[in-house]
Amino acid sequence: MDNLKEIGIFGGTFNPPHMGHYSLAMEAQKEFHLDKVFFVPAYIPPHKEPRNVMDAEHRLEMVKLLINGNPDFILSDFEIKRKSVSYTIDTIKHFRTEFPETKIHFLIGSDAFYHVDTWKDSPEVLKLTDFIIFPRAGNTKEMITKKLGNFANVVFWAHTNLIHISSTDIRFRLRSGEDCAEELGAKVAGYIKEQKLYR
Ligand code: ATP
């Protein structure tokens, strides 16, 4: 994978991954001319389980199914393989080392970016990557600019419409017996059904 000029890093819990994630990565790729987008599921320690997080192996498999067939989307097991909580700074440094000549963009929803100032080594994170932000209901551009004005030079707002899909909502609906195939895509929905996940 040489000669990559620009890549996107898309971190998340992906519990489960959904078509919202997929469409946003597509939109970002198109608007910002990304050669590849790396999906990086987070490792969540089993004893923590803050939100009923599915096993890492299942989440990896589901992301694989979500992006299957798109040669520009790549699954990275970097965070999960480390088997400890990874901070964004560690992940960015890893990709910086792997791709020293490549420009790195971090893809993120506005709800998650709103808390960037609390991240470990956030000033350094902002030096190593910029951010492509997807608007998400509840955290508007105005709120973010007001809170994080000094981060403005590393932020690009993706021109995407609001996508009203969330993993939380999907988990809730799966538990009540819906298949959520439209939000999950047929392959991920099929996997969840077959493995009897999120019941
Ligand atoms: P949950 O509902 O469990 O919080 P999620 O749907 O936000 O999950 P994550 O895996 O936490 O999914 O998301 C990974 C990244 O994608 C985060 O930066 C999140 O803000 C962003 N994201 C997820 N869904 C959307 C969406 N519908 N619109 C914009 N950004 C999104």
Image: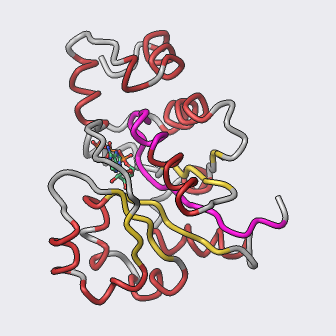
Q: Nearer the viewer, residue 88 or 65?
A: 65
Residue for point 57% across, 53% down: 30
Q: Quadrant of residue 101?
A: bottom right
Q: Decide whether residue 12 is among the magenta residues.
A: yes
Query: Of 46 and 153, which appears nearest the observer?
Result: 153
Where residue 29 sits: x, y (%)?
A: 57, 54
- Is 52 placed above or below 118 here? above
**Image point 46% across, 60% down: which residue?**
107
**79 and 183: which is toward the camera:** 183
Q: Residue at x 39, y 82 (%)?
A: 122
Describe residue 142's horizontal placement relative to residue 17 as left or right. Answer: left
Nearest to the observer: residue 115 or residue 44 = 115
x, y (%) of residue 192? 44, 18
Report the magenta residues as a range.
Answer: 3-23
Question: With respect to residue 52, does 43 lie above or below?
Answer: below
Task: Give me the residue at 64% from left, 45% from top.
Answer: 73
Q: Residue 12, how many percent across, how many down?
A: 43, 51
